[in-house]
Image: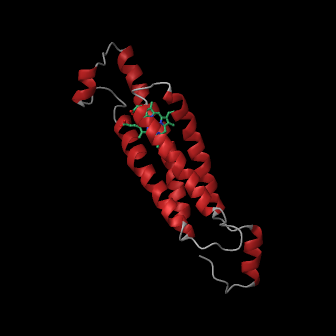
Amino acid sequence: MRRIYAVLAWIVAGGVVVQAASIAFALGGIAHFVQEGGVIDKALVESRQAVFTGELGFPIHGIVGGMVIPAAALLLLILSFFVKYQRTHLRGARLWAGVVFALVALQATLGYSIADMPYLGLIHGANALAVLVAAIHAALRTRPTAAARVARLASPNAVTT
Ligand code: HEM
C-alpha cells in the first residue's frame, strides 16, 4: 500500500515535469513557426493539422494534465484512506493526498480557463510548482523515519505495510 501511494505521488510529480516540458516544446514550436513567416489563426488551430514542430506538445499537455495527473491524484486520495498508519511516518498521508488532489483540481480548472482569461496563466504556471512540491512531499513521507528503521531492525517480525 505504502509503495503504491509513493508511486502515485511520484507519477503526479513526474507529470508536472512532462507538463512543463510539453508546453515549452509547443510554445517554442509556435514561436519558431511565426518567426519563419507562418500564420496561426482560428481555422488552423481548429483544423488540428500538424504544421509546426512542437505541436504535439499541446495534446500531450492536455492528456497528461486533463487525465493522467488528475487520475493519479484521485487514486492517491482514495488510497490514502486505506494506508495503514505505522508509528509516525505515514501520519498525514490523507492530508497530503488531499492537498495534492486540491492543487491538481485547481490546476486543471485554471488550465481549461486560460484561453478565456490569459491572466490565469500566471497562477497556472506558479501552481504547478506547488503541485510538484506537495507531490514530492507526499511521496517522501512514505519513507520510514530513522526511528522506524531502528525499531524494525530491533524487531524484524513487525508488520509494515
Ligand atoms: C500539474 C501540472 C499541470 C497540469 C495538471 C496542467 C493542466 C492543464 C490543462 C488541463 C490545460 C487545458 C488543456 C486543454 O484545453 O486541452 C492546460 C493548459 C495550459 N497549460 Fe497547463 N498544466 C500543468 C502545468 C503547466 C505548466 C508548468 C505550464 C507552463 C509553465 C502550463 C501552461 C499551460 C498553458 C500555456 C496552457 C494553455 C495552452 C493549452 O491549452 O494547451 N501548464 N494545462
Check the image and tell me how it is coloured. secondary structure
Task: State whether residue 22 appears in this view.
Answer: no
Ligand 1 quadrant in view: top left
In depth, the one of 114 and 22 nearer the eye is 114
- The residue at 63%/82% (across/down) is 159
Q: Is the residue 85 above or below the residue 58 in the image?
A: below
Task: State whether residue 66 appears in this view.
Answer: yes
* Quarter of the figure with the C terminus: bottom right
In depth, the one of 17 and 122 nearer the eye is 122
- The residue at 37%/40% (across/down) is 62
Q: Is residue 25 left or right of residue 151?
A: left
Q: Is the residue 20 above or below the residue 95 in the image?
A: above
Q: Is the residue 125 above or below the residue 87 in the image?
A: above
In depth, the one of 139 and 52 nearer the eye is 139
Query: Exactly how many numbered labels are in the figure?
Result: 0
Residue 32 x, y percent position in the rendering: 39, 20
- The residue positioned farthest toward the top in the image shown: 37
- The residue at 40%/39% (across/down) is 61
Q: Is the residue 106 above or below the residue 53 in the image?
A: below
